[in-house]
Amino acid sequence: DTPAYEPPKVKSLAQ
Amino acid sequence: MSGEQGTWYPCRSQVTEWRNVGQDTLVLHLTLKQYHILNHVAGRIWSLCDGTRSSRDIAEELARNFSTDADAVLSDVTDTLKGFGTMGILDAGSSS
């Protein structure tokens, strides 16, 4: 199934 | 900003590589050597940034995918696209 809607989240990492 | 006068069609940058990891999407900026991990909603927004859809189009597609209201998700889409722009993972994109 399609997962439920959640607020979009982004985690960023430098190499 | 000229982008505010027309409609912006965000497009994934050519200096990125990405792949799905479970529900998340891992985006690598090839020149900045930065990794970005997007949850399933942000990843769906990312996948829709193909240069043919405006933020409104993306919100409508997202609403269709998640059975919710486009107006309710539009601000999330706009904020996420701004974030993508700040990270440098979107091309300047075309405006009409």
Image (spheres, coloured by chain):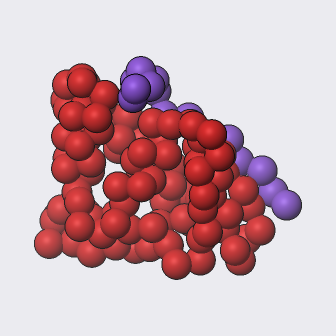
Chain colours: A purple, B red
Query: From the viewer's perspective, is B64 left or right of B41?
Result: left
Residue at x 72%, y 56% (from the top left corner): B35
Query: Considering the image in quadrants, where does the N terminus of chain A appear?
Result: top left
Query: Considering the image in quadrants, where does the C terminus of chain A appear?
Result: bottom right
Residue occupying the far right of the picture? A15
State the image quarter where residue B2 is shown.
bottom left
Residue occupying the far front of the picture? A1
Query: From the viewer's perspective, is B65 left or right of B19?
Result: left
Q: Is residue B37 visible?
A: yes
Work out whether residue B67 or residue B34 is closer to the camera in this orientation and state it: B67
Total numbered labels:
0
Whole-percent x and y of residue A6? 45, 24
Say if B83 sits above or below B9 in the image. Answer: above
Say if B80 sits above or below B15 in the image. Answer: above
State the image quarter where residue B54 is shown.
bottom left
Whole-percent x and y of residue B5? 17, 64
State the image quarter where residue B18 is shown.
bottom right
Whole-percent x and y of residue B29? 66, 68
